[in-house]
Image: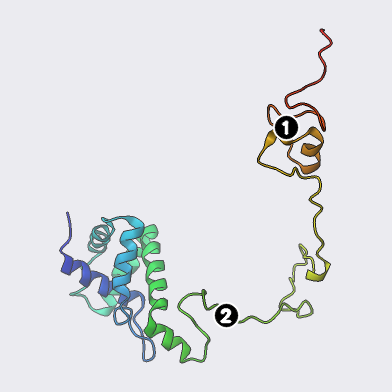
Amino acid sequence: MATDPAAIAAMLRELVDVLVPGDGRFPAASDAGTHGVVADRLGAQSGEAALDDLAETIEACGGPLGPLGATERQDVVRRFEADHPEQFETLRMITYLAYYESPAVVRAVRSLGHVYNDAPQPAGYAMAPFDETDPHQAPAHRRGHYVRTEDVTRLDLTPLPSEPLAPETITRDDAVASGRGAIAKGAGSKRGGQAGAGPADDGT
């Protein structure tokens, strides 16, 4: 049964505020508009019935949240997390991403002196070059390895067929040299040989 739209909106607003209540510097999730983004993304990810399912879950866990005090709301959400972990994890991740993308929260993070964007791209973040002498950057476990940029050499592509998508041009030597394994049916059996030709039939 579809839940009343006003009840859905109130439920989302109250729910995201339990997850991200805010403080003196950071706004509560609903004040940042998080609940509207959550509604859009939850529906896009889990289907049109996702909001009705969420409302039913909250009610089954002791809701609705509106008449409850702060402590009772937290108890409902803790039960939601315990009894419906997958549904809760989806909601929590969508809520956190939506919150930290909102302009008000971006400003709050920057006010702490951090370089912060609502998404890693396209602006990106400036990074210092890798320093192999820095013990904090070098792998402590000493497993694996890497090749320094100045030591990288070009691969020899000579053995590869000039037209890799045309199997009839691949010879047996080409297949072995390029690691292509068995030759496609109809391919030549020796360099310069006729396509499809195989070993001579001695009649036995």
x, y (%) of residue 10?
21, 72
Mark 1 or 2 closer to N-term?
Answer: 2
Which of the 4 image quadrants contains residue 88?
A: bottom left
In which quadrant will I find the N terminus? Answer: bottom left
In which quadrant will I find the C terminus? Answer: top right
Please indicate whether residue 8 sits to the left or right of residue 121 in the image: left
**Badge 1 amino acid:** Ile
Please indicate whether residue 185 sits to the left or right of residue 3 in the image: right
* Residue name at image x 23 percent, y 59 percent: 52
The answer to whether residue 24 is above or below residue 125 is below
x, y (%) of residue 89?
40, 63
Disc 1 and disc 2 in contact, CB within 8 angstroms? no
Kindly identify which residue carries mark 1: 183
Kindly identify which residue carries mark 2: 125
x, y (%) of residue 78?
34, 68
Find the residue positioned furthest to the top: 204
**Badge 2 amino acid:** Tyr
Q: What element carries label 2?
A: loop
Question: Badge 1: how crowded within 10 Å, few (<14), some, or many (20+)?
Answer: some
Q: Is mark 1 on a helix, strand or loop?
A: loop
* Residue name at image x 74 percent, y 36 percent: 170
Which of the 4 image quadrants contains residue 39?
A: bottom left
Please indicate whether residue 105 sits to the left or right of residue 39 in the image: right
